[in-house]
Image: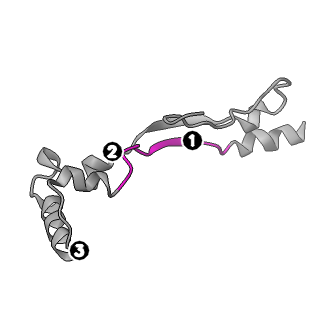
Amino acid sequence: MGLGRIAFWMGGGASGGFSSYTRVSVSDAGVFDVFKHVFREGDDNPAGGDEAYFRARMVDVGRSYDNYRDWRTHQISDHLPMWAEIETDFADAYLESLRT
């Protein structure tokens, strides 16, 4: 399995005997763009606070980068984190199966 995938067990299987209470329902999923929310620039950074922090940080550590974009690339991976919201609480179906 490579980058860009999230895997999880959907329940069921060959027999399908457990599928009523082990299934997984995907409610939502997406990618968190750190460059729109953490290391912002341009229109995503309207007050310029992130770039101001960058300049102050370069002075503090005695380093220089030609520009903010180069610096932020070395702060965090450019492989954006993926997320998935899943529903897994199917206790009622499981408890009902125990009664029968």
Q: Is residue 62 left or right of residue 30?
A: left
Picture disc at residue 86 = 1
The local crowd at label 2, few if under 14, some if 14 to 19, many if 20 or more residues have their Cα within 10 Å, is some
Q: Which residue is mark 2?
A: 33
Secondary structure at badge 3 equals: helix
Residue occupying image coordinates x 33% and y 44%: 33
Q: Which residue is mark 3?
A: 61
Instruction: Work out whether residue 39 can be spotted.
Output: no
Amino acid type of the residue tagged 1 in the rendering: Ile
Marks 2/1 in contact by CB < 8 Å: the verdict is: no
Which is more N-terminal, label 3 or label 1? Answer: 3
Foreground label between 2 and 1: 2
Residue occupying image coordinates x 20% and y 76%: 60
Residue occupying image coordinates x 80% and y 44%: 95
Q: Residue furthest top?
A: 14
* Residue 96 placement: quadrant: top right
